[in-house]
C-alpha cells in the first residue's frame, strides 16, 4: 500500500523580484518566465507576491508548463487588490489576501515557502532576502545583467555572518535544481521523524 501521508506535498519556491522591471535590461522578463517554467518542470510550486513584473512573468512561465501558482497579496480583499493596489489576478491558482501591506506580506511570502529565489529586484527584494537570511531559508540568487546579484553579494560580504544556504547561478535550470536539492536535504530529517495520527494518540 502506498504511503499517502506526504504524497501531496510539493516544494514551494518563492520568486522575489521587481514589480517594475524597466531597469532590468533587455530580455529580463523572458528570463523570469524561464525561471518559472523550470520550477514547474522540476515539480515544485511557485509562490509570488501576486504582483506585476518579474514575479508575474515567473508565474506566467510556471502556468505555461502546467505548474501550480500561489500568490500572497498585500491587500485584504480581492477588490482592494485590484482597485486600491492595482495588482493583477492573472496566472494564480490561489491568492491569499494578507492585509499586511508590502512589509508584512514579504515576511509571510518567504515564510510560506521552502526556499527563495531572487532575480532582478529593488528594495522589496532586499527585504525578502534579509528575512529569508534570518530565517535560515535556502536562497538562490540568479545572476544576470541587472544589479541585484552584485548588491546582494556586497550585503553578504559586509554582513559579517557566514551562511552556507546561499547559492548563485546564471542558469535558471541549474539554480532551481540546486535549490530543490538543498530543500530536500533540509526535509530529510523531518521525513524520518514518526508522526502520530489522532487514532494512535
Image (cartoon, rainbow, N blue to C red):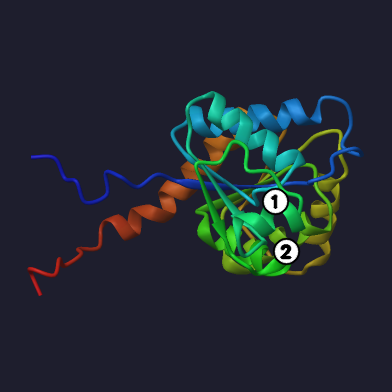
Is 201 left or right of 116, judged from the image as shown?
Answer: left
Image: 85 above or below 30 = below
Q: Where does the C terminus fall, quadrant-wise? A: bottom left
Q: How far across and how far down the image is residue 9, in percent?
A: 35, 47
Vertical placement of 132 versus 30: above or below?
A: below
State the image coordinates of residue 200 (x, y, percent, origin top left).
8, 69
Mark found first going from the N terminus, 1 or 2: 1
Q: Position of residue 65 (x, y in %)?
A: 52, 24
Residue wearing tag 1? 82
**Quadrant in the picture for the N terminus:** top left
Picture residue at 44% right of the left edge, 46% below the top: 11
Residue where numbered disc 2 is placed: 102
Task: Identify which residue is drawn at 58% across, 28% down.
Answer: 37
Residue 198 image-quadrant placement: bottom left
Q: Which mark is residue 150?
A: none
- Which residue is rendered at x = 42% and y = 47% of the image? 184
- For the residue labelled by badge 1, is the local secondary structure a helix, a strand or a loop? helix
Amino acid at each position: 500500500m502506498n504511503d499517502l501521508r506526504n504524497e501531496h506535498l510539493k516544494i514551494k519556491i518563492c520568486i522575489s523580484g521587481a514589480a517594475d522591471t524597466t531597469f532590468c535590461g533587455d530580455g529580463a522578463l523572458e528570463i523570469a518566465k524561464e525561471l518559472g517554467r523550470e520550477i514547474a518542470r522540476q515539480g515544485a510550486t511557485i509562490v509570488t507576491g501576486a504582483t506585476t513584473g518579474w514575479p508575474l512573468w515567473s508565474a506566467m512561465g510556471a502556468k505555461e508548463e502546467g505548474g501550480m501558482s500561489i500568490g500572497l497579496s498585500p491587500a485584504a480583499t480581492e477588490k482592494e487588490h485590484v482597485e486600491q493596489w492595482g495588482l493583477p489576478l492573472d496566472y494564480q491558482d490561489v491568492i491569499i489576501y494578507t492585509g499586511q501591506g508590502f512589509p508584512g506580506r514579504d515576511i509571510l511570502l518567504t515564510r510560506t515557502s521552502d526556499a527563495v529565489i531572487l532575480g532582478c529586484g529593488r528594495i522589496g527584494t532586499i527585504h525578502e532576502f534579509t528575512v529569508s537570511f534570518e530565517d535560515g531559508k535556502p536562497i538562490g540568487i540568479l545572476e544576470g545583467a541587472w544589479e541585484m546579484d552584485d548588491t546582494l553579494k556586497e550585503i553578504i560580504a559586509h554582513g559579517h555572518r557566514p551562511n552556507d544556504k546561499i547559492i548563485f547561478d546564471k542558469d535558471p535550470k541549474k539554480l532551481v535544481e540546486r535549490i530543490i536539492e538543498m530543500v530536500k536535504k533540509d526535509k530529510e530529517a523531518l521525513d524520518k521523524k514518526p508522526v502520530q495520527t489522532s487514532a494512535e494518540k
